[in-house]
Image (cartoon, helix red, strand yellow):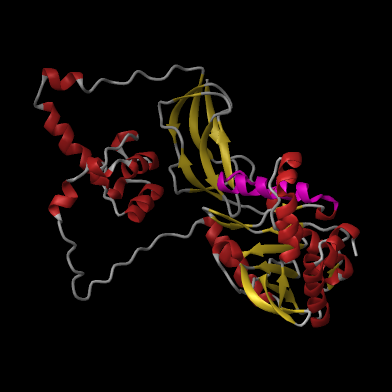
Amino acid sequence: MAIEIKVPNLPESVSSATVAEWHVKAGDAVSREQNLMDLETDKVMLEVPAIADGVLKEIRVEAGATVQAGDVLGILEEGAAPAAKEAPKAEPAKNEAAAPATASAAPQMSSEDGQSPAVRKLLSELGLSASQISGSGKGGRLTVEDVKNYSAAPKAAAPAPKAAAPAPAPRPLGAREEQRVPMTRIRARIAERLLEAKNTTAMLTTFNEVDLKAVMDLRAKYKGDFEKVHGVKLGFMSFFVRAAVEALKKFPAVNASIDGSDIVYHGYYDIGIAVSSDRGLVVPILRDADQLSLAGIEKAIVDFGTRAKANKLTMEDLTGGTFSITNGGIFGSMMSTPILNPPQSAILGMHGIIERPVVVDGQIVIRPMMYLAMSYDHRIVDGREAVLTLRTIKECLEDPAKLLLQL
């Protein structure tokens, strides 16, 4: 029985998707719930699983194509056995002359012109030519896996290029190489959102610094017991989330958003945590953060990071949020001005922890200091509220007991 493999219903506000990669080839046997291919949307990767055991008879939409909900991606023959593969090796034994003809035809079928957009893009990024690689796809065409496998092969397997070019030749005078590749959907969406924030909000940033000695002492004293009891490491982000929530409770406008001519004050605290992934920056939402313990926050953040790397975050994970936190410090940033995530009215930027001399009680001491930055929409948040919000976060972190006592 032939079954059409269709694009599933796309998340709300997503009108189309891009075929990112097929994980199987035409003629392959597949099992029920096996992921056949990935669809890339503006925010998340969607898997398209097989709905029955059988054989993938036909691929109708190649990688790189744009599709919409309900489009037919391929045909699955339910319950069919995989087609017997021909044995090309037996032919040369009978007719040695057949081998050169096959060999000479292969590069022609594997030319860049006949490849899918995803394969052409990958070849361009790796600086490879399709004629270097044997294709396993239909008609001898390359698949993304063919290119990846060739690229990952040991260097010793291809010594010829070194012999052909023992020394790098100088770049010809006037030669200026360029690469032009299309934006991924998520990169295009990030660009759109950043431009939207710049053009539609009155964004301003206020700065402060925080002495993290008390937090670091607390972590050093209890991190072993914390991990044994809760099964997760005690990081810094949970302290910042709790401090932010306490500040938002005191200054509701910073947790609010603008909707047309109305201000919407949110009675809950959904904190967006910026997470870096191979596809770009994503901001999953830590919902009802005020009701979570430090352990609950740390577990959720670890889960976000794991699923972001595996492209397993859902639209539900990325939708909503009343306030965001981004940590450029993990990449070595000392100071930055974070950009708002509309329609949120504020975002907190964390940075690197650096030991610096500071004055405490009239004495110069060395302390682990971090610069804090909070960008806010001046249409809804006044400067006083923004400064006091950041100062409250600073005070909570410099005296963590306030987080426990909610002072």
Left or right: 339 with respect to 17? right
At x 73%, y 80%, the residue is 363
Q: Position of residue 77 (x, y in %)?
A: 49, 23
* 307 in magenta: yes
- Asked whether 84 or 34 is in front, the reply is 34
Q: Is residue 283 above or below residue 211?
A: above
Query: Bounds of the magenta span?
Result: 291-316
Q: Residue furthest front?
A: 363
Position of the C terminus by quadrant: bottom right
Left or right: 57 with respect to 269? left
Does residue 321 appear in this view?
Answer: no
Q: Is residue 336 above or below residue 271?
A: below
Q: Residue furthest left?
A: 97
Q: Quadrant of residue 169?
A: bottom left
At x 53%, y 54%, the residue is 279
- Asked whether 200 or 221 is in front, the reply is 221
Left or right: 295 with respect to 167? right
Q: Quadrant of residue 361?
A: bottom right
Q: Position of residue 158 (x, y in %)?
A: 21, 43
At x 37%, y 40%, the residue is 143
Q: Position of residue 377 (x, y in %)?
A: 74, 76
State the predominant SS element of the stretch in magenta: helix
Q: Position of residue 79 (x, y in %)?
A: 51, 17
Does residue 67 appear in this view?
Answer: yes
